[in-house]
Amino acid sequence: MKLFLRTLGFLAAAIPCFGATKVATLHPILADLAQQVGGTNVEVVEILKPGADVHHFEPAPKDLAEMRGAKLLLASGKGMESFLDKLRDSLGAGVKLVEVGAKIPSIPFEEHHHEHAEKDGDEHDHHHHGSEDPHWWHSAENMKRAARVVADELSAIDPANAAAYAAGAKAASKRFGELKSWAQKEIAKVGKKDRLLVTAHGAFGYFCKEYGFEPISLLGIGRSDDASSKHVAETIEEIREHGIKAIFPEDQANPKVLAEIARSTGVKIGEPLIADGTAKVAHTFETMLAHNVRSIVAALAPAPAAK
Ligand SMILES: [Zn+2]
């Protein structure tokens, strides 16, 4: 059996040992994190699965049935899951609901455009409602914090394996640090003055903060509102002023306004970015970051000089 596990590599981590702690998750990135931290001591059940829409998900009776027997339920928090209060009432005793994001410092949504709005005295501005940005898992530093939160919660439930959880969190954090270094090296190819990230919805605040970009999003934080013509005009102005080369749709959002902006400014439309971390092809921090960094660098970095 040992040899079999070793051969399968990372897949082996998905085979829980007897008596494993059942952990239910409300985000695929949290499922991957719980697996990395918990290893064979946990059995992870993904309630919100890859491909689902984090902003419009509501647990159905079958999801509640799947949670049965879980000791821990991991949510993103920071307001991402508007259904948590309701869910809390239907959860059995014995399961602890943890909003992992609660222990991670928040950044307010789109400060940059907020300033514009105040200056112009425009009170109708649904892009800047001043709420906290729930997309914290775009930052490697936040992922390290999250790994510690998960290890602490698992250790409280299953103290006998506390050392294994601490080691799991340490290994995951090391990996997140390596990914951050890789991302920084890649992003260094994009000039500092070209680091304006125009995306469909407001999902990239933490990414932008970590890698020195300024975020501009056409839709709001929850992807459900429309871009005002004033906001579109401002964005076009910024793109022209900074000579920005590309703007980005997302795997779950490609509003018409992006094509309109491309037409009037001549910018290219980059590869769709993975905004909510639930793309079927990339729903771990590692695969999401790799995809996004490669797409952003490909579109915004100057073409290598021909030899
Ligand atoms: Zn989002």
Image (spheres, rainbow, N blue to C red):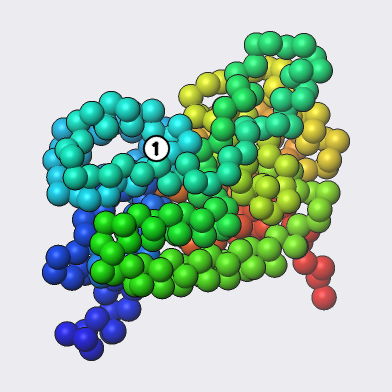
Can you tell me whether the CB of the residue at mark 1 lies under 8 Å from the nearest atom of ligand 1?
A: yes
Give the structural element (helix, strand or loop) at label 1: loop
Q: How far from the left and from the top, in percent, is residue 74?
A: 34, 47
Farthest residue to the right: give it. 241
Answer with the quarter of the image where residue 232 lies.
Answer: top right
Total number of numbered discs in the rendering: 1
Q: Amino acid at mark 1?
A: Val
Q: Residue at x 47, y 41 (%)?
A: 102
- The residue nearer to you, when weighing 54 against 101, is 101
Q: How far from the left and from the top, in percent, is residue 140?
A: 56, 58
Q: How far from the left and from the top, in percent, is residue 63?
A: 20, 39
Q: Is 297 located above or below residue 256 in the figure?
A: below
Tell me: 89 left or right of 128: left
Label 1 crowding class (10 Å Cα cut-off): few <14, some 14-19, many 20+? many
Tell me: 8 left or right of 269: left
- The residue nearer to you, when weighing 147 against 212, is 147
Q: How far from the left and from the top, in percent, is residue 67?
A: 19, 44
Q: Which residue corresponds to mark 1?
A: 54
Tell me: 32 left or right of 134: left
Quadrant of the snapshot with the C terminus:
bottom right
Q: Residue at x 66, y 32 (%)?
A: 110
- The residue nearer to you, when weighing 249 against 47, is 47
Q: Residue at x 81, y 29 (%)?
A: 237
Quadrant of the snapshot with the N terminus:
bottom left
Q: Residue at x 60, y 60 (%)?
A: 294
Answer with the quarter of the image where residue 98 lies.
Answer: top left
Q: Is residue 87 visible?
A: yes
Q: Is residue 284 visible?
A: no
